[in-house]
Image (tube, grey):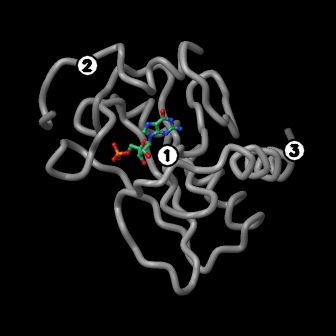
Amino acid sequence: MSLYGEYDNQNIFAKIIRGEAPCYKVYEDEDVLAFLDLFPQSYGHTLVIPKRAAARNILEIDPENLGKVTAAVQKLARVIAEELEPAGVQIAQFNGAPAGQTVFHLHVHIIPRYDGEALGIHASAKADEDVLKALQARIQRRLGL
Ligand code: 5GP
């Protein structure tokens, strides 16, 4: 998929927003949803998406929804850093397949980075569900949920 095209409302993140596909949700409000990445690049890899914008990428999203996503990214990055104590936190966002995008609903990656781990942009291993459940509980507790 390229940088330009039609929004496909059957994409996996649209299904997660509609409740048609499961996710390990860590935070939700009227405008954004945050959940754990199923193929994480690191322990705590989280995705933040807009709920009210049918935008494939950053070129398409309106500034108001982008602002809400960005505010949620900061809030969650802080909480994840406090809870998991990584050595760094990477914020990543890809637009178009050649740039690494695989799901065409705008999303921002929050990737805790730990000393000694290699940097990459995609992981192939699916996370253990028990690990995701425990992470979800830790992050939600830290958020006061
Ligand atoms: P992109 O490469 O498009 O920036 O990132 C898409 C991300 O979505 C990848 O990190 C991938 O692991 C994640 N992902 C793909 N399918 C699913 C899914 O069904 N559930 C969750 N939670 N994450 C997914």
Report the amino acid beneath label 2: Tyr
Q: Is residue 34 above or below residue 134?
A: above
- CA–CA distance between discs 3 and 1? 20 Å
What is the x, y in percent for residue 21?
A: 55, 20
What is the x, y in percent for residue 109?
A: 46, 51
Report the amino acid beneath label 3: Gly
Q: Disc 3 or 2, which lies upstream in sequence?
A: 2
Residue at x-position 35% and y-position 30%: 105
Q: Nearer the viewer, mark 3 or mark 2?
A: 2
Answer with the quarter of the image where residue 86 lies. Answer: bottom right
- CA–CA distance between discs 2 and 1? 21 Å
Quickly name the residue at label 1: 70
Q: Secondary structure at mark 2?
A: loop
Residue at x-position 47% and y-position 39%: 67
- CA–CA distance between discs 3 and 2? 35 Å
Crowding around mark 3 (Cα neighbors within 10 Å: few <14, some 14 to 19, many 20+) is few
Crowding around mark 2 (Cα neighbors within 10 Å: few <14, some 14 to 19, many 20+) is some
Q: Secondary structure at mark 3?
A: loop
Q: Is residue 101 above or below residue 56?
A: below
Answer with the quarter of the image where residue 133 lies. Answer: top right
Would you say 56 lies left or right of 63 here? left
